[in-house]
Amino acid sequence: MTGLPIHEVAALAAALCWAITGLMSATPVAQLGPFGFNLIRQSMVTVMLGAFVLATGSWVGTDWSGVGPLILSGLVGILAGDTMLFFALRRLGPRRTGAMFALNAPIAALAGWAFLDERLSTAAVIGVAACAVGVAMAVLGRPGRSGSHRFEAMQGPVWQGVAFGLLAAAGQAAGSLIARPVMAAGFDPALGSLIRVAIAVVGLALLMGVFHRLPVARIQGRPTAALLMQIAASGFIAMAVGMTLLLFALQGGKVGIVSTLSALSPVLILPVLWAITGARPSGTSWGGALIAAAGMALIFLR
């Protein structure tokens, strides 16, 4: 390999964005509910991305034949995947939810091999496996001194949180798989993000309208100005920046590798969690982080 692996770096940067916003989102999700939080955040992100696309003129000269697959990718990866993710977050907390969501990496690697005929080198396969093992150790190990913090609290049956987490991982993997050919053909990442997020907003609004009698399908609290600012910051970092970086990474990176690197957010969340809670994660978690880092090195040096 020669030169800087820019697409892989972009995937890793997306993971960092999601590590930060995973903690930022915990309180708003608890107060507004998964549907309410997702609708407000995605609506804000749609406005942000729309303004950026109009200001830069990135839509000029676009091959609009890629819009259909991106709409489908948004419905599967953002509408379904993100909503399930926030249901899991509410039940399991950010650390455990990260473990479930990280499973999108091996799912995407297998799907890329099966449907896109993507072949990975031996070093890349070992790197993907090491990242998966490292993430599992980092997230599923004992919480260490942060175990008493509210971020570690669980609500409701564990199996429900696990099920939501698995559905979120599958949705993310499928969304990436659908978007990959369009992005590889050169579709603009910011415009692609706008299309995916906007269709998710429409889908969420329709679902909440149809199922408005169900408490879970409503905005469950009154958002304050401070809460709205927190949601806007979370949306900007996670979606406007993180999702656009992911789509850029899919322009030149294989689905399995991009998904693996972008799934490292549970490892990157450890120092963030330490900084916020003031409690050091367990030795097992740090050991898993080192294994994931070794796997990442194999991917970059393949």
Image (cartoon, grey):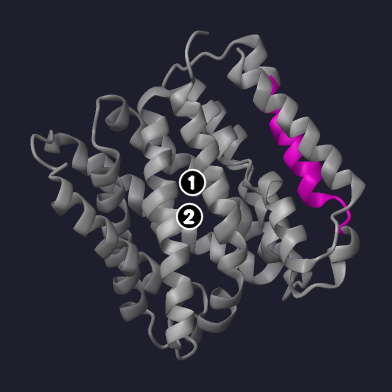
Crowding around mark 2 (Cα neighbors within 10 Å: few <14, some 14 to 19, many 20+) is many
Q: Examine the rendered structure and indicate whether residue 55 appears above or below residue 210.
A: above
Q: Earlier in the sequence, mark 2 or mark 1?
A: 2
Check disc 1 and report the residue beneath it.
Answer: 172
Residue at horizontal 69 percent and vertical 56 percent from the top: 272
Check disc 2 and report the residue beneath it.
Answer: 81
Give left or right: position of 166 versus 184.
right
Query: Which residue type carries mark 1?
Result: Gln
Give left or right: position of 49 versus 256.
left
> Given contact means CB atoms under 8 Å apart, are the residues at marks 2 and 1 in contact?
yes
Q: Is residue 107 visible?
A: no
Q: Which residues are magenta?
A: 127-143
Q: Residue furthest bottom?
A: 222
Q: Examine the rendered structure and indicate whether residue 152 appears above or below residue 174.
A: below
Residue at horizontal 37 percent and vertical 34 percent from the top: 248
Q: Residue 155: x, y in percent? A: 72, 76
Query: Which residue type carries mark 2?
Result: Gly
